[in-house]
């Protein structure tokens, strides 16, 4: 796919393995010494071919578990393997140009069905975090809950394209900041009464959190993650009974598949949390 504005997330061709290679030493240090990552389950990922990796991410806009997963992925499969990650359109709108450029060069594209389909048509691996901003800024007491914000587009994508879903879970990254609450409903009410959005963009979430560098962060501002240990697990593929356009067009079937994925990932996360608790006691 081609685009008019380079590095705006609407092209698959901006991905540059050399740029990814340049980031690898930084990610390696963070992986081993800052977040002290433990990970398993990588045998569930086929060495080639198109797949849909579905995750729940944590830790505010920094999403350290996403970057640590990416580091291990590239270390295992190499930077040449076609891999793309969907990034929320709002993040593309508010990010400085250099951040958008680096994101695009590392394989990020706009979170839009046509970009995901185009990547799968190239036999690529596609990483999706359906929960978006509501997921990364969910309150700290929900840190061990899978939250997709009701978004089911990834199910329709998997059914239409006939690809397996590889669930991805993690524990620890939501301790790199502490989200107290999300006040989006209240802020949206103020907007409806006439208060303009900052930069004219609906933020989707409006958290209040404790974390670096602000101390108390008000709103979805970028954060510097605290050095909490992160545990990442790749789970067994989820294969549905039916695929194809007809399956993807059935609301009842899509809802059932959505609940299957959410429920299975929650069970896996519960097991991971329990394992970590036992190992630390």
Image (tube, rainbow, N blue to C red):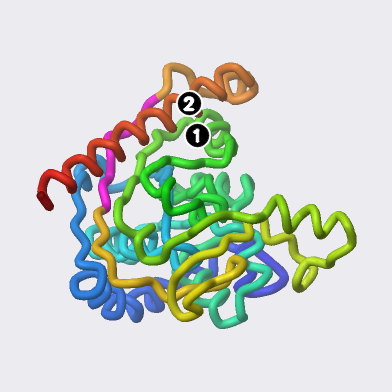
Apparent side of residue 32 relative to residue 194 in the rendered image (left or right)? left
Residue 235: say if magenta: yes
Is 262 drawn above or below residue 210 in the view shown? above
What residue is pinned by disc 1?
A: 158
- Front position among marks 1 and 2: 2
Query: What element does badge 1 sit on?
Result: helix
Is 264 drawn above or below residue 58 in the view shown? above
Residue 137 marker:
none
Is 262 drawn above or below residue 214 in the view shown? above
Q: Residue shown at 28%/39% (left/top)?
A: 235
Q: Residue shown at 40%/49% (left/top)?
A: 143
Outermost residue on the right side: it is 194
Image location (x, y in percent) of residue 80? 34, 64
How many other residues sit within 10 Å of disc 1, few (<14), some (14-19) or many (≥20)? many
Q: Would residue 80 be seen by someone viewing this image from the given angle? A: no
Apparent side of residue 4 relative to residue 159 in the rendered image (left or right)? right
Q: How many marks?
A: 2
Residue closest to the eye, 11 or 208 = 208
Residue closest to the eye, 165 or 258 = 258
What residue is pinned by disc 2?
A: 259
Q: Would residue 209 be seen by someone viewing this image from the given angle? A: yes
Q: Residue shown at 48%/59% (left/top)?
A: 179
How many other residues sit within 10 Å of disc 2, few (<14), some (14-19) or many (≥20)? some
- First in sequence: mark 1 vs mark 2: 1
Image location (x, y in percent) of residue 190? 81, 58
The magenta region covers 232-239
């Amino acid at each position: 796919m081609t685009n008019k504005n380079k590095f705006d997330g609407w092209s698959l061709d901006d991905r540059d393995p050399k740029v990814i290679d340049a980031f690898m030493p930084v990610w390696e240090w963070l992986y081993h010494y800052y977040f002290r990552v433990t990970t398993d389950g990588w045998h569930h990922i086929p060495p080639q071919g198109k797949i849909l990796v579905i995750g729940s991410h944590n830790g505010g806009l920094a999403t350290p578990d996403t970057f640590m997963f990416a580091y291990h992925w590239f270390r295992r499969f190499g930077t040449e393997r076609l891999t793309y990650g969907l990034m929320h359109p709002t993040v593309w709108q508010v990010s400085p140009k250099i951040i958008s450029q680096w994101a695009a060069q590392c394989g990020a594209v706009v979170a839009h069905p046509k970009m995901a389909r185009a990547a799968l048509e190239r036999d690529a691996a596609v990483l999706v975090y359906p929960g978006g901003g509501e997921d990364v800024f969910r309150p700290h007491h929900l840190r061990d809950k899978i939250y997709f914000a009701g978004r089911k587009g990834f199910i329709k994508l998997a059914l239409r394209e006939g690809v397996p879903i590889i669930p991805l879970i993690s524990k620890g990254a939501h301790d790199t900041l502490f989200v107290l609450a999300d006040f989006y409903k209240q802020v949206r009410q103020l907007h409806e009464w006439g208060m303009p959005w900052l930069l004219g963009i609906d933020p989707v979430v409006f958290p209040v959190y404790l974390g670096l560098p602000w101390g108390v962060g008000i709103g979805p501002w970028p954060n510097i993650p605290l050095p909490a240990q992160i545990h990442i697990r790749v789970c067994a593929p989820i294969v549905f009974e039916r695929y194809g356009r007809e399956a993807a067009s059935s609301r009842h079937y899509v809802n059932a598949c959505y609940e299957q994925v959410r429920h299975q990932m929650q069970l896996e996360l519960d097991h991971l949390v329990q394992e970590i608790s036992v190992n630390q006691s």
